[in-house]
Amino acid sequence: MSSFHGMSSVHRDLMDGCGRLPSVGAVVKGERPSLPWFVVDAAGREIEPVSRYLRDLALGDASALTGRSYGYDLLRWFRVLWAVDVGWEQATEAETTAMVGWLRTAPNPQRRRSLPDSMPAGVVNLKTGKTTLLDGYAPRTIAHALTVVHGFYAFHQHFGRGPVVNPVPESRDRRARLAHRSPLEAPAPTRRARLRPKVRERQPRAIPDRLWDELFAQMRCDGDRALLACYVSSGARASELLGVRLEDVNWSAGRLWVITKGTGQRDPVPASPQAFAYTAAYLDQAGLPEPGGPLWRTRRGDPRPLTYWAMRRVVQRANAVLGTNYTLHDTRHTAATRMARDPSLTLVEVQTILRHAHLSTTARYTSVGLEDLMDKLAEHYQRPRQEVRWSQTYDPADVEAVFGAR
């Protein structure tokens, strides 16, 4: 069946970016452990089908942040259904097409640039080599939205609810290959399902040593220096390190204990002596936290846990001075790249430090970027061209007759 079958003018307007989604409903933080987040409609009423799905995710050991992310994707989906006046149980592929078309054309409010000197979208920062984000939604965001909506309907189909056919198209080729693939075999390329965007594999975004020194010099206090030093020496994720308590710091062994993303378990990560020195200076200045409280706290006003957005703002202020566009997650890429290129560390050891589930993820950091080859390329361009010389055993007349005059 064609995706355009049964489309109304509202469907087409959304797909072409002419229509607007109603800014109604919200994702609300719940008070029950079985439902940490839920979605409400325009009247503030809980959307029960979404709550059932999110509750199943929570009971399946998904993190609260996963439930929050899925909640926003499903809120967007229901806004599409409200815009075209279709119930969730009557949804078809036409509504999925309208949502994908809207995501491909609508501006992303999270990427709105309010500062007058902000770099335009899609422009390469010549200092870092990184491209600024586009104004719209990234292909990875569209793919994630399709995955969430597909899982929502697959869950309800299991219990005999919702439409007979999942509104999100599937890739039969991928499903068939995964069903008969041995876990020892490398995954074979498969066709994308209809409406699925092309998602490029992310390349490591390590910060060069010279630019790292400039970024570190922009930190205004020992707390910011300690966090940045811990990030680049441990390779921990931003949210993991911000959740460290004083009881999680092993000063003698040079380790920190963090809650690993995905597993929810506390695992040890290393940190450099420089990072521990800055951490000690920060605690000497800010004082020790309360028992069980977070190690990293705000400096102004009443002490509060330092959030991801607050630390993100620290990096943004440094970017404004340096003219760069680094992110907080680039520190993990920097740590991983440094470790992967250290000849004294094996790839399996780096995988253990970074807590990657698969070795192939760690192997990405062994790739060489163009910026790493600039010195070698400069020597290559300055090297004189080598003339072709034939062995003296060949008659010059024969060489000229076969290959022509040089």
Image (cartoon, rainbow, N blue to C red):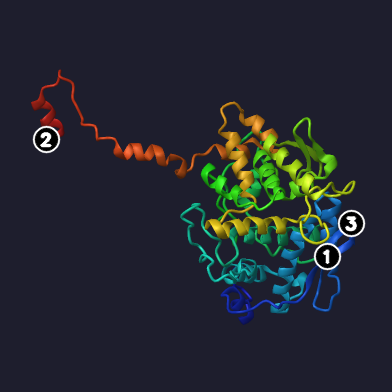
**Considering only vertical position in the picture, is 398 above or below 299?**
above
Q: Position of residue 225 (x, y in %)?
A: 67, 47
Q: How many marks?
A: 3
Q: Residues within 10 Å of mark 1 (few under 14, many from 20)?
A: many
Q: Nearer the viewer, residue 46 or 95?
A: 46
Q: Is residue 364 left or right of residue 282?
A: left
Question: Mark number for residue 397?
Answer: none
Q: CA distance from mark 1 to mark 3?
A: 11 Å
Say if 368 sits above or below 297 in the image.
Answer: above
Residue occupying the far left of the picture: 397
Q: CA distance from mark 3 to mark 2?
A: 82 Å
Q: Which mark is residue 38?
A: 1
| Left or right for 153, reference 235 | right
**Amino acid on which the number 1 mark rests in the picture:** Phe
Distance of label 2 from label 1 (alpha carbons)? 79 Å
The residue that mark 3 highlights is: 34
CB under 8 Å between discs 1 and 3: no
